Image (spheres, rainbow, N blue to C red):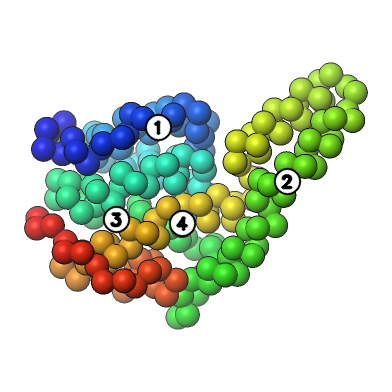
Amino acid sequence: MIDEYEKLLAGLDDVDWAGLEHAYGSAHDVPGHIRALCGSDEEAREQAFISLSSSIFHQGSRYSASPAAVPFLPRIAIAAPAAAREDTMMLITRLAVDWHDEYDVTTGINAAGWRAAAAECRPAELLPWYEEQWAVETDPEKRAELQEIRDWVAAGNSFDSRWSALQAYDAVSPNSPAFLSCSTTRTPVYGPGSPTSWPGFPKSPPPPCPAS
């Protein structure tokens, strides 16, 4: 790790990653992958991208670890080693909006429709049902299973991918002005095809993009 990039990872070790999940279970390995993005080992950096792309973003699905990873990725996309920036920006945009989310390429992100659909499956809506089922269940094995699910939902999780995807979108959205500033000064992958430039993201004036 290059010392000048340590500031980009401020707070990384303060997150309870082991208490979060990605596609393969515990997200305890996520901080190591994020840290590798700022390293000088090209092979390790490429492997980190592959691992993150298949764990916190797995075939379009997002998990509780996905929005938790977002605060660190914009810093890397803007000010990390040049070799890490493009892939990091691509990962951020995929975390924000993917092919099966509530958007149309020509009209942009239907945030209102997305929120309405996700609201029906938010944890607060699901939890009472699981608590009721757990309270009346008498079979010890089934009761234990219901308690595990109830605790998982109570921790802010939902079985519906629209909810977890929206959490990632909301985590990325406040950072879009900075992305937009870079979209005009760097590689075309940051340009009009990027979700950060579609309707639905804030369009406030972006801050200056740091020099390469």
Nearer to us: label 3 or label 4: 4
In this rendering, the label closer to the viewer, 1 or 3: 1
For label 3, the residue is: 89
Badge 4 amino acid? Asp
Mark 1 element type = loop
Instruction: Bin the neighbour count of mark 1 within 10 Å (Cα to Cα): few under 14, some 14-19, many 20 and up.
Output: some
Q: Are marks 2 and 3 in contact (CB under 8 Å)?
A: no
Q: CA distance from mark 4 to mark 1?
A: 18 Å
Mark sitting on residue 170: 4
Identify the residue at horizontal 13%, vertical 57% (top origin): 210
Q: Amino acid at mark 1?
A: Val
Left-right relation of 200 to 81: right
Residue 205 image-quadrant placement:
bottom left
Disc 2, SS: helix
| Screen quadrant of the N terminus | top left
Few, some or many C-alpha atoms within 10 Å of disc 2 (few <14, some 14-19, many ≥20)?
some
Work out whether 71 lies above or below 184: above
Q: Residue furthest bottom?
A: 106
The residue labelled by disc 2 is: 126
Query: Spatial distance from mark 2 to mark 3, Cα to Cα?
Result: 34 Å
Res. 191 in view:
no
Could you say where residue 112 lies in the image, as x and y percent from the top left? 57, 70
Q: Which residue is mark 1?
A: 15
Crowd around label 3: few <14 · some 14–19 · many ≥20 (10 Å): many
C-alpha distance separating marks 2 and 4 = 21 Å
State the residue at coordinates (25%, 37%).
Answer: 9
